[in-house]
Image (tube, rainbow, N blue to C red):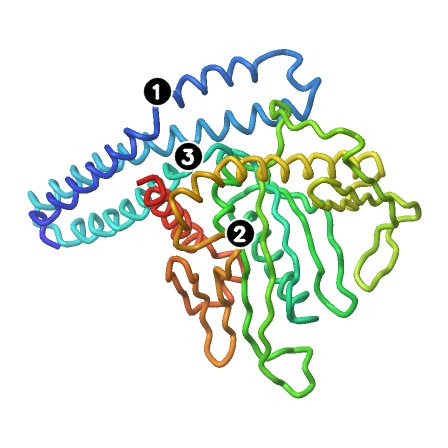
Amino acid sequence: MASSDFSAEIRDLRNTFASIEAVTDVDGIKADIVDLSEKAGVPDLWDDPSAAQKITSKLSHRQSELERIERLDARIDDLEVLVQLAGEEDDADTLAEAEKELKSLRKALSELEVVTLLAGEYDERAAVVTIRAGAGGVDAADFADMLLRMYLRWAERHGYPTAVMDTSYAEEAGIKSATFEVNAPYAFGTLSVEAGTHRLVRISPFDNQGRRQTSFAAVEVIPLIEQTDSIEIPDNEIKVDVFRSSGPGGQSVNTTDSAVRMTHIPTGIVVSMQNEKSQIQNRAAALRVLQSRLLLVRQEEENAAKKALAGDVKASWGDQMRSYVLNPYQMVKDLRTEHEVGNTGAVFDGEIDDFVDAGIRWRANARHELAE
């Protein structure tokens, strides 16, 4: 690329950055940093470790947000200087370096642009993800386990803390269901586009005749409840059952009946927790997840009338949304966004950012069409 060709590209980068900056509310981020820094400096902050962790985590996230924006602004300035120097000296190597940086900046701005689309009421929250095996027998249970690993690896790649709260193992292989938290800002807004039915097509490793099998798993994503949320559940609306935790193959891992199953009688929502050490801890965790699910139900009910008036969105969250095909060819394809990749191994190892980004853009477009 000749140095003269960079002018339009840099102008386009600046326009994109300006539009992102306009909706990011940089002044608001700076004000949050000042406020959170004051709270983080209180001497008795760590008297309440849970509250302290939330404050320091949010402060770190806000600081990272501001640093990311300021760094991108500086990189665009640096690119312009680099191109100018390359043109003056007619240096092909410097131009090649500038072209590489231009490509990197485009990608970074695209990723930042996706973040600006996370503006839902609960998008800033941490997430609670539940994966359930669907139709397909042992293959579905194994598929659910593959998805669990995929999301945990994705979180690990990003440095997001996770905690598996409950696991129900299948008899032969895999899991019937699992619930885990992703404790990072915007985890709900990001992962909520993964909610829906996932389909796997492959030669079954559990079929002696080596036949191709199709299996399904469901992914549910809800925002983590916070103390400021007004979700009160009367005691007479909750049924609590206590049972013994179990590991793979049904083996007992606890000597006491510490696992808890909590049922919300009016809605039929059931939450099980068994990964904490005591029944009291499992009960508290189950109540928090139950409140989170009821919070999302309340939001969906509030939006139901609007959806009915506006008509259906092009795709619904309960529909099949992604196919993972391992035979007769290798392909992972999102059925909403049409985004697809051929490296299935990388996807199952947690490389799903492109799918998540495409899903966030798809959702933003769907909401925009719904609002018109």
**Nearer to the camera, 66 or 169:** 169
Q: Residue at the location (73% across, 45% down)?
A: 271
Callout 3: helix, strand or loop?
A: loop
- Residue 7 drawn at (x, y percent): 10, 43
Residues at marks 2 and 1 touching, judged by CB atoms closer than 8 Å:
no
Quarter of the picture holding the C terminus:
top left
Which picture quadrant has residue 239? top right
Left or right, 97 with respect to 255, comes to left
Which picture quadrant has residue 159? top right
Q: Which residue is mark 2?
A: 195
The relative height of residue 356 versus residue 299 in the rendered view (above or below) is below
- Residue 192 drawn at (x, y percent): 51, 46
- From mark 1 to mark 3, how far is it between C-alphas? 17 Å
Q: Which residue is mark 3?
A: 119
Q: Residue at the location (51% across, 67% down)?
A: 345
Q: Which residue is mark 1?
A: 27
Q: Residue at the location (69% across, 42% down)?
A: 267
